[in-house]
Amino acid sequence: MTLLAFDWIFLIEKLVLIVIIISVSLVIAMYETYAERKVAAWIQDRVGPDRAGPWGILQPLADGGKLFFKEEIIPNSSNKFLFVLGPCLAMLTAMMTCAVVPWSSKLELFGRSIDMQIADINIGILYVFGVVSMGVYGIMIGGWASNNKFSLMAALRGASQVISYELAMGLSLIALLMLTGSLSLKTIVEQQQAGLWNIAYQPLGFLLFFVCALAECNRAPFDLPEAESELNMGYHQEYSSMKLGFYLFSEYINMFISSAIMATLFFGGYDVPFLDESKLAVNVAAIVGLVALMLKIFFFIFLFMWVRWTLPRFRYDQLMRVGWKNMIPLALANMIITAAVVLLIKK
Amino acid sequence: MQTLIPHNADESRRMMQSLTNRAKPVDRRPMNFVDRLYLPAVLKGMSITFGHIFKKPPTIKYPEQTREFSPVFRGLHVLNRDEEGRERCTACGLCAVACPAEAITMEAAEREPGEENLYREEKYAARYEINMLRCIFCGLCEEACPKDAIYLSETFAPSNFARKGFIYGKKDLLIPNPVTQPEEYAKAKGKR
Ligand code: SF4
Ligand code: SF4
């Protein structure tokens, strides 16, 4: 009986972990919407939402409830199947990325040592890249299926933007991977725990990666696919009710996940600076690590918002110029220099 | 005075006076390398926005907080009574005619014998309603009234969830009786 040999508890453990991580990222995405409004308010010398509950903390629930009860409209001339598929795909790809992020070191519960990571695959970063590049299908399908010229325009912009910036992102990562020599996110974090954080070796790489992450998440100043003022919300113009909610939500989940990836790749993941985790008890270290990672993630989320409420949107030609003429040459130079230095040191 | 007409852009620029001393000429130099990196400008912008996070917002959280008004502020209407506590309004309708927003509705009734302590004139307003959503608080009703029966107080129209709540009847408008409720009367009368 091969079935009996299977580690059932392992399966349950992973399922529980998946449920926890998915719900946590949903809750965080919910509160990101609240944080976004609050940060925008502070930056603009306003108060922000403060009516629903103390300090307005029930605002995301109110917003969600409102979205649920809105009328569900599917335009007559749209392709119905694709119209529904678009937001589902956006949400799915947003959620799938969190599978490879190592949230913390091992936790010991009920005599088992539990990985705080859904899957430690040895091609972690490649997986992230694959899933992220699928994310553009959500935008493209949604924009195309809406059968609306603004949406189509936005979808085209979105596609070309994501493709252009993915190149620079990939190139900036290659430089990092030359240093780490591994694609597994867990290994990368463990290396940073032992030595310096990767930001110390790759400041330019991080900067490029951060700018590309802004573009990949369609965040300002690269929010051309949903440019409210010129394209009437762009690709999700025809969407209403929870389908719109999915699109908006997936943007916030993307923001959360890309913050997690940036923290993992460049800022030591769950590593606490100036603290030797191996001296702590295993569980304490895991919890401290989780808190450290969350703090880093929240900082990046704040950074995303701070950038959004500071910078105006790029014009389309500027976007392309920055992407192809500035970012990619810089990333290439960064890669070549890193390669040369790595070679020299190895010799 | 003779008007000068500029004949070309150069001349018009010379003739244009700056309205404030804070006017700055637009910098139209082509971008140099540092500018094209965008980063210095981005960092500068971000430091400005970060500074704003710690500024105190000037928001007045209405309805919990209200702004201080000047004594001539035109707020909610009050239907006045005379010193003996009788309603002054005689339902002449002049306020309704004067009202540019057509916010006032009323129904007249005749004073019965024995009601002299309630109404000052033989005719009075049985129903007197002001729709506060229509009202623009111009105070023309106050000016039109020959009986000094209506005036605008310093109070702000409170917020409400339903439109019905903004139609104020006599119950809401009438000032408390100065004879039987002198304290409330003084409070409603305000500083005027
Ligand atoms: S204040 Fe002006 S608008 Fe309001 S009821 Fe009087 S006359 Fe009409
Ligand atoms: S409030 Fe004055 S103007 Fe209006 S009906 Fe009464 S007496 Fe006439």
Image: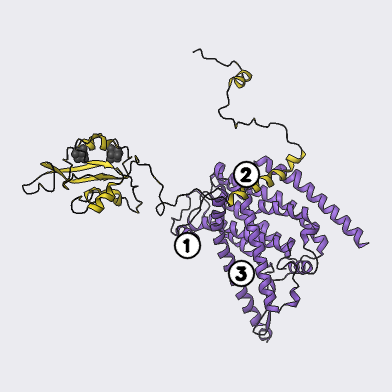
Chain colours: A purple, B yellow
Measured in 3D between alpha carbons, the distance from the residue under mark 3 to the one under mark 1, in whole angstroms, is 27 Å
Q: Nearer the viewer, mark 3 or mark 1?
A: 1
**What chain does badge 3 belong to?**
A
Residue labelled with disc 2: A313
Answer with the quarter of the image where residue A190 lies. Answer: bottom right
Q: Nearer the viewer, residue A218 or B130?
A: B130
Residue contact at pointers 3 and 1, CB within 8 angstroms: no
Tally of numbered discs: 3
Answer with the quarter of the image where residue B80 lies. Answer: top left
**What chain does badge 1 belong to?**
A
Residue labelled with disc 1: A54
Left or right: residue B12 compared with residue A6: left
Mark closer to the chain start, 3 or 1 = 3
Which type of secondary structure does the marked residue at label 3 adopt?
Answer: helix
Q: Quadrant of the C terminus of chain B?
A: top left
Left or right: residue A299 compared with residue B129: right
Measured in 3D between alpha carbons, the distance from the residue under mark 2 to the one under mark 1, in whole angstroms, is 34 Å
How many residues crowd mark 1 within 10 Å: few (<14), some (14–19), many (20+)? few
Residue contact at pointers 3 and 2, CB within 8 angstroms: no
Q: Evaluate whether label 3 is on the same chain as label 1.
A: yes
Quarter holding ligand 2: top left
Where is residue A229 drawn, in percent x and y?
A: 55, 42
Residue labelled with disc 3: A21
**What chain does badge 2 belong to?**
A
Left or right: residue B18 compared with residue A280: left
Where is residue A166 drawn, in percent x and y?
A: 71, 53
Q: Evaluate whether label 2 is on the same chain as label 1.
A: yes
The three-letter code of the residue at mark 3 reads Ile
Left or right: residue A261 compared with residue A50: right
